[in-house]
Amino acid sequence: MKQFNQSGCKTKARMAEEYGVCLKTFSKLLTEHGIFIKRHIITPKEQEKIYSALGPPAEINNLRRFTGKDNPLSV
């Protein structure tokens, strides 16, 4: 597997930012994919699980892949 993180742990907020979503949406995505992070710090091993489930952030320009909506951020 490609090494996505060379700098160690990240926060949930940082990873949400990488995916271009708010923290609440990122947490929901993790739950929907069966990933449960108890702390706000995500270890490299947990990051690998997230990247495997959601794909690398660089490949995701919007949430259509997850939600099926053209504009998932609209109300």
Image (cartoon, rainbow, N blue to C red):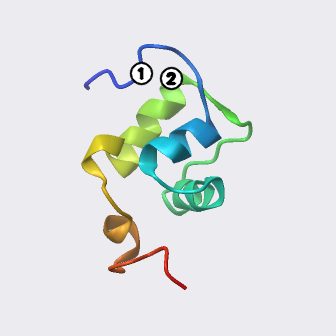
Residue beneath disc 1: 5
Report the disc number at residue 63: none
Residue 17 to residue 45: above or below: below
- Name the residue located 53 percent from the left edge and 32 percent from the top edge: 46
Image coords of residue 2 (percent x, y): 25, 24
| Residue 59 shows up from this direction | yes
The residue singled out by tag 2 in the image is 44
Would residue 56 be visible to someone looking at this image? Answer: no
State the separation of the CA atoms marked 2 and 1: 7 Å
Quadrant where the N terminus lies? top left
Q: Amino acid at mark 1?
A: Asn
Relative image position of residue 7 (x, y in whole percent): 48, 14
Q: Secondary structure at mark 2?
A: helix
- Mark 2 vs mark 1: in front: 1
Q: Residue at x 63, y 53 (%)?
A: 23
Q: Could you tell whether 50 is left or right of 10 in the image?
A: left
Task: Answer with mark 2 or mark 1, whichever residue precedes in sequence.
Answer: 1
| Residue 73 at x, y percent in the picture | 49, 74
Q: Residues within 10 Å of mark 1 (few under 14, many from 20)?
A: few
Name the residue: 35% across, 62% down.
62
From the viewer's perspective, is 32 left or right of 56? Answer: right
Dot 1: element:
loop
Q: Quadrant of residue 66?
A: bottom left
Quick one: which residue is furthest to the right in this view?
39
Where residue 34 appears, as percent x and y from the top left, is: 53, 55
Is 73 left or right of 54, judged from the image as shown?
right
Q: Is residue 40 left or right of residue 53?
A: right
Residue kind at label 2, given as amino acid type: Pro
Contact between marks 2 and 1 (CB within 8 A): the answer is: yes
Up-down relation of residue 53 to residue 25 (above or below): above
Category of crowding for the residue at label 2, using alpha-carbon neighbours closer than 10 angstroms: few (below 14), some (14–19), many (at least 20): some
